[in-house]
Amino acid sequence: MGKINDLKDQALATLRGKWGSFVGITFIYFLLAGIASGFTSYGSILQATNLSTLYIVCTCSGVLMTLLMIPLGMGFSVAHLHASRQDLPADPSDLFYGYKNFWHVLGSFILVYLAVLAGFILLIIPGIILSFAYAMVPFILRDHPELSVSETLWTSRMMMKGHKWELFVLELSFIGWALLCVLTLFIGYLWLVPYMQMTITKFYEKIRAEYEGAGTENTAVGNAEMA
């Protein structure tokens, strides 16, 4: 637990005096995600009615909006990464960072989703393991956009080797705060989510340093740098 507490302390130190900006980008992220999911939810309601054409339109719009939201998820991670490295408040424009390389980001996340889904269909546990194996994909997409989709996923798997359980325990350590946030009618998540995301960002920085420090000549990152 010592290492986890150190990461949490680092996250809180970075957030200190900047909470307003992180709560702000979290609110924007939740708002846009809510609008996107609203199309799908409305389509599900219409499914039970005779408004079949409107149902198809809303469902297709929901799928499209969901796909368009994927780079925003990467941008949320990037906003925390940039703020962590520069010791600055969160920049709302970073939320849209993933759209600079839209198809590459979309392809990477879709492949992750399919791999994790296949794992859950098989025996559930493989899906959980794969979700942690690919947890660093958003950060790797930011730091190494030159990598192909398969190289990005492979790099995340190699980087997370021996660290999946550590990340699982780290995320589990927030469960108490998550339960308390329910009592605030979920408003507390505007503070908890940046805290969690910044801690995961610090976790990424730690294992990235270990991974690259071990020598990248035989890694996708090393091969790309030498190309």
Image: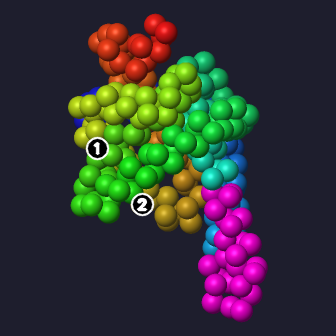
Q: Secondary structure at mark 1?
A: helix
Q: Nearer the viewer, mark 2 or mark 1?
A: 1
Q: Residue 213, position in %: x, y?
A: 34, 11
Question: Dividing the picture into quarters, in which one does residue 42 lie?
Answer: bottom right
Is 138 situated left or right of 129 in this image? right
- Residue at the location (49% across, 65% down)? 183
Q: Secondary structure at mark 2?
A: helix
The answer to whether residue 56 shows anywhere in this view is yes
Is residue 48 found inside the magenta-colored segment of the image? yes
Numbered range of the magenta stretch: 42-66
Q: Amino acid at mark 2?
A: Leu
Is 84 situated left or right of 206 in this image? right
The quadrant in which the N terminus is found is top left
Is residue 164 found inside the magenta-colored segment of the image? no
Q: Residue 13, position in %: x, y?
A: 50, 27
Q: Which residue is mark 1?
A: 169
Q: Amino acid at mark 1?
A: Val
Q: Is residue 202 above or below residue 122?
A: above
Q: Is residue 213 above or below residue 129?
A: above
Question: Dividing the picture into quarters, in which one does residue 79 lie?
Answer: top right
Q: Residues within 10 Å of mark 2 (few under 14, many from 20)?
A: few
- Whichever of labels 2 and 1 marks the residue nearer the N terminus, that label is 1
- Residue at the location (46% across, 46% down)? 111
Question: Farthest residue in the bottom direction?
Answer: 50
- CA–CA distance in space, label 2 to label 1: 16 Å
Q: Residues within 10 Å of mark 1 (few under 14, many from 20)?
A: few
Q: Which residue is mark 2?
A: 179
Q: Residue 7, position in %: x, y?
A: 38, 30
